Amino acid sequence: EMMLRALLLLQVLQTALATPPFQIPPGLQASFGPPGLTQVFTDQQNVPCTLYENIIEFDDGRDENEWYCEVFGVDATNAGSARSQTDVEVEGIEHVLAANPDIQSGKTTLFAQGAGLSNHKLTIGSGSVLTFGEVDQDSRRANRRQRRLSASSGDLSVLVVRVTTADKALTKSIATISGDVFGTAGSGDTINLKSVVEDCSNNVARINPGSGTGSACRDNDNAVFNFNTGVTDVDGNAVVANCAFFYNYFFTGGTPGDLCDSDFYGLAAQVSPTADASKNARTECCICGGTLGNYNNNVVDGVMELQLPAVNAVGSTNKQVDAAALAELEVLFNVNSLDQIFDNVMLCLPLGTTSGGSTNWVAYAGLTGYRSVYNGDFYCANELTQLHEVGHNWGLMHSWEGGAAYEDQTGAMGFTTGAADDEPQGNRMCFNGAHSWELGWYAAYNAEINPLTATFAGTLVGVDRVPNVLSCEKVVLKLTNSDKDFYVLYNHAVGANEGTYEHINMVTVTSMPTTTTATNVEATISAGSHATFSNWDGSGQSVTVSVTSIDADAATGAAEVEVWKGGINDRPALSPACAVAAPPPTSGPTSGPTSAPTSVPTSGPTSGPTSGPTSGPTLAPNPSPTSGPTFGPTSGPTSGPTSGPTLAPNPTPTSGPTSGPTSGPTSGPTSGPTLAPNPTPTSGPTSGPTSGPTSGPTSGPTLAPNPTPTSGPTSGPTSGPTSGPAIGPTLAPNPAPTPGPAPGPTSAPIASPTSTTVDRVSEVTGDPHFKTWKNEHFEFHGQCDMVMISDKHFANDRGIDIHIRTKIVRFWSYIQKAVIRIGNDILEIEGLPDFSASYWINYEHMGELTDLAGFPVSLNENTDRYTIDLGSLYPGEKIQIRTFKEFVGVKVLGASETSFGNSVGIIGDFHTGNTYARDGSTVMHDFTELGNEWQVLPSDGHFFHEISKPQFPEKCMLPENPQGQRKRRLGESTVSEEQAEAACAGLEDEFSRKGCVYDILATQDLDMVGAY
């Protein structure tokens, strides 16, 4: 029987190796191109290796992608490793990517004929012959012997290693780190990697502390089998077949070519299971010359201390310390690779190591690998950094928005470092729609349609609702597309996902190409809005995603979503999947009015009329209240002139007319009420009329009313109070109002308002750079909503608020949006990557935009500059909002003491230029504190159409390098400082030149000069 097995094996080997150029016969599937070992070269690659991608993040906004290959046996020895399996850097990866741009980490294999191996590098030249293959991930080899894809579900064993070098150590103890990762009992750390993963996945993935005791096998890949293959290579040398060779082949059905498998070639195991009961699980140890042994390491609650007394952190690269730690760990655990025991290994290195010459690296992880590495205490402890890196292990790439990586902050694969680990807020976040689908955590609650052939009308619930999801409700809706699929998710900011930073409680549409897991935000949709995608899948047809309603309640929150082929006007008849049948209509009309409206029709008529009319409206009131007070006067005169109209009517009619009428009316009414009425009504009519009417409305308000009364009464009191105050302003004021009402009667008309000409400029642009009223400059790189300018007395007490919203990209931030409120009108502007801009006028997206509270608004031909002309009230003054790609800038031009003299905000005091705190007296010189001081408070009003975190009481989110210092390694930058200075040299203003240089270096985009 043993002879028969040997002969069968010999036959397969002879067929496989003798078929030029070593092609695998039918029935035998090769995962790699050439055979594993035909001739041992001491300086070249002998067996195929598996490619892996490392993604390294830096705290200055960069990331780097580097490729390495996992080599075995003699190749590991040639690379300079004492281990039989090791990772080598791929030098010349550009040749590999040019030959195969669709390489997938952990799946694609490489054999580079003629490639050199030395000093832990695989060097590939332009003349190397490259052969690619693919690892069979379904085989037991992928799940046992060679590195497997990191699992993202089930019970996951995680080992955390606190690495101490000869010169450096972390400050956090083993117990503290265990709390940071596992929430160990007694640690007090309630938000940690374990809790975040288990809450987000609803325990589909369970993070467990790894153990330090057990048994494992350490193979000898150079063991030679006693089979005389009879095959020679082209030089006449005998072909050597070893363990590494067989691990590189798979057979039909996914069975690995392992001599020790029980079904190898359909035969029994080469080693009898009864020969040594202790080796049943790892019989390859016998035949491959390995050793099966026990290990007993001091792992406490999933964390172990690893001393590297021969290694210094300072002067070493992170990869050198990483490699030294791995080599020691593999000996301690008696394995070739730690993923034989653990699902994930997290190495926490002390500060001091470098990556590419820089010490400011954050962390890195192998895409589809098992290992992640962290730089220092902060990143080792931060659960969102941990989740981001482990997400790479799970095969997830970065989340993009607006053409930039990390920009999607709805999920953990964007820029999501969040608060420090010991701060409670901001660190509970899951993944965006595309990555949520990829992980498979909500597979039972997801849906998939081809929008060209099917429609959808249903309810989407947030991830925190799982598993309390109705059969008609879904979590992620996938819209199929041959190039990139689209994923629709309700980004409900509660529970497990309460820390999501943007597009809060909105429906998000993210895309993911079929060849990668990098995602991009395609649309964010609020209630009553929609997004239409043209030329879907090259069909020439559009697809529309519409959100009819959103419920943000923590317990019942959901979004009603519809999807159909065509534009917004092509909506077919759709029936929501979760629709509740309406009750039948009443059998007849009621005989009289009911005392109060019912919420649904009654089953029949009432028996008789009610005792009186209803006290409130019937079942059909106005569909929604207006957002502020109305612009125009009431339909009848009041009993006496007040200093300005009140925001709500008196509860009873006025008592009577004044003593005499005015001699004539004014030629036109004022444009609207003032925003600040007298706190109480006047006690009675004025004592006398004015001497005569004004010839027309004044062109601007006087600074104080005349002290004398009017000369006569109005014609009569109003007949009664109005039916109720307006809840908010209407969106359609008088078509041509005057810029503002006069605060009181004048004795004679005046030509124009008085003003103090100062002609100052305040500005906030780009990255973001602030210019005070006194032309002084500073920067603040936090992320939050901030008050740039606020003055409740602007434009005759209509008031003005200018708020900006900043967004972090690692060590710097930029102004993403700006919103301006004047009176009852609100204009919000956002930059877009394609150089266009998006705006909302009174919360209507891209609505008709002609004026803002009566001040004309113009848009230039390039649609990148909005100008609000204040000249009708403040001659020569303007507000400009400019966009450049995603960047937004706001500039106030020609400001005078009359217009902005009383303004407050982050740009300082108009008269002194001092950057005051909100108390108006404390001068703040720390601009980080100043930014937090002028974070928008609830009392300032929220004017943006959507909420984005952080919001008070959460402080502004600071970048990973809080000082915002540029540590970019200019030698590795594509744009040098000299090039940036040359590009910005034509700017006249020194402030603009400095900001321009800074922005170009931060973004590595010379076109950023266009923002100035």
Image (tube, rainbow, N blue to C red):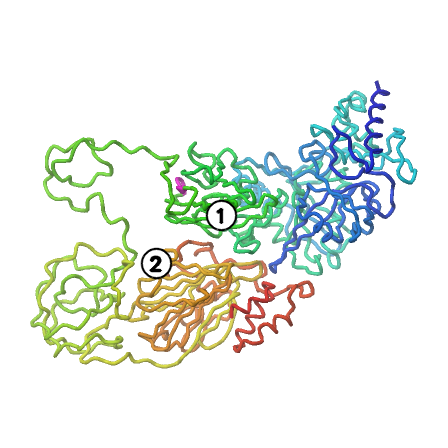
Instruction: Pinpoint residue 778: horizontal percent, then vertical percent.
Output: 51, 71
Q: Residue furthest front?
A: 540
Badge nearest the viewer, 2 or 1: 1
Q: Amino acid at mark 2?
A: Asn
Other-residue count near label 2 (Cα within 10 Å), few / some / many at <14 / 14–19 / ≥20: many
Give the mark nearer the N terminus: 2 vs 1. 1
**Residue 944 sits above or below residue 536 on the image:** below
Q: Residue furthest right?
A: 236
> Residue 514 placed where, x, y %?
59, 43
Asked where in the image residue 369 lies, by quadrant, the reply is top right
Return the mark for residue 720. Answer: none
Which stretch did the figure color magenta? 554-561
Q: Residue 21, position in %: x, y?
A: 82, 38
Q: Quadrant of residue 724?
A: bottom left
State the residue position of label 2: 842
- Label placed on residue 535: 1
Q: Residue at x 43, y 31 (%)?
A: 471
Real-space Cα separation, disc 2 to disc 1, in angstroms: 31 Å
Q: Position of residue 696 (x, y in %)?
A: 19, 75
The amino acid marked with disc number 1 is: Asn
Q: Residue at x 41, y 66 (%)?
A: 859
Of residue 419 and residue 653, the one placed in the foreground of this image is 653
Is disc 2 in contact with disc 1, using a CB cutoff of under 8 Å?
A: no
Q: Is residue 574 above or below residue 412?
A: above
Q: Foreground: 140 or 743?
A: 140
Quadrant of the rendered image containing residue 863:
bottom left
In percent of the image, x 57 and y 49: which residue is there?
413
